[in-house]
Image (cartoon, rainbow, N blue to C red):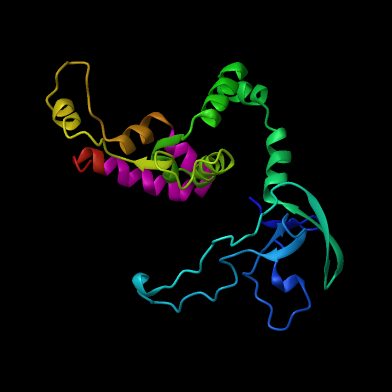
């Protein structure tokens, strides 16, 4: 959130924006309120490990601030190789974008009243800590990664990352060992356990969605295999 972005092209401010020999494109910047100056962002600018390097041998750089007091709000002008350029923070841009998406707008889309959205948002922000407990199936949908990015953004702006009891927990299976024996014992005639991906495909018009996203030919081929798997009991 405190990383600096150029106002002219909305790209991160990098070392390559300055007239520096052998400038690195993975070195980013912060604005240090302690010195009122531009500083390198800790942990950036390190060359990537060679391909195939075992994970336990990769030395990750420290992101310790070491006295830096990064600004998250504000606008400054820095001298680049292209001349003076205004810069701001990711947080400032996020505020402006979020202001366009009001609870009233969300109410029209979701049917959830704007007052309820505000109530939940304020409760989440004031709880210390807060956790998002989510399933992993969002990542299986087109643009589901954007939903997960939004979840992480919410955690970041409310200060709920890197804390015990906070963060994002993603699971596909129940943690309680008693849940599945209970479900599979068929305690009631109305209780059923379904293969979730099959349920989604049938009841969420996934063939039509696939056709819109990938074209009719591929959607028909996928549907052929799906129908065959149902007929032969593979699902």
Apparent side of residue 52 relative to residue 127 in the rendered image (left or right) = left
Q: Residue furthest right?
A: 83
221 part of magenta stretch: yes
Q: Main secondary structure of the magenta part?
A: helix
Measured along the vertical axis of the image, is residue 150 above or below residue 121? below
Write down the region rendered in magenta.
Answer: 205-228
199 part of magenta stretch: no
Residue 17 occupies which quadrant of the picture?
A: bottom right
Residue that appears at 55% across and 73% down: 46
Q: Looking at the picture, tell me which residue is in the foreground, 25 or 60.
A: 60
Residue 115 occupies which quadrant of the picture?
A: top right
Q: Looking at the picture, tell me which residue is in the foreground, 127 or 135.
A: 127
Residue that appears at 34% across and 71% down: 56
Residue that appears at 63% across and 63% down: 41
Q: Is residue 45 something one can see in this rendering? A: yes
Q: Residue furthest bottom?
A: 21
Residue 199 position, x and y percent, is: 33, 32
């Amino acid at each position: 959130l405190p990383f600096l972005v150029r106002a002219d092209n909305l790209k991160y401010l990098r070392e390559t924006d300055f007239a520096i020999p052998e400038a690195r494109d993975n070195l980013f910047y912060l604005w240090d309120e302690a010195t009122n100056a531009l500083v390198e962002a800790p942990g950036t600018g390190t060359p990537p490990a060679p391909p195939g390097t075992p994970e336990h041998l990769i030395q990750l750089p420290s992101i310790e601030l070491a006295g830096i007091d990064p600004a998250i709000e504000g606008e400054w002008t820095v001298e680049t190789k292209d001349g003076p350029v205004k810069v701001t923070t990711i947080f400032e841009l996020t505020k402006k974008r979020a202001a366009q998406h009001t609870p009233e707008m969300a109410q029209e889309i979701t049917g959830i009243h704007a007052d309820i959205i505000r109530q939940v948002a304020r409760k989440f922000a004031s709880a210390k800590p807060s956790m998002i407990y989510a399933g992993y199936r969002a990542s299986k949908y087109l643009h589901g990664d954007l939903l997960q990015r939004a979840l992480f953004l919410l955690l970041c702006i409310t200060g709920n990352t890197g804390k015990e009891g906070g963060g994002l927990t993603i699971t596909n299976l129940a943690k309680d060992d008693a849940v599945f024996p209970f479900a599979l014992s068929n305690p009631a005639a109305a209780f059923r356990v379904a293969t979730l991906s099959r349920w989604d495909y049938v009841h969420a018009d996934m063939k039509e969605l696939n056709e819109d996203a990938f074209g009719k030919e591929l959607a028909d081929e996928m549907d052929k295999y799906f129908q065959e798997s149902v007929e032969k009991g593979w699902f």
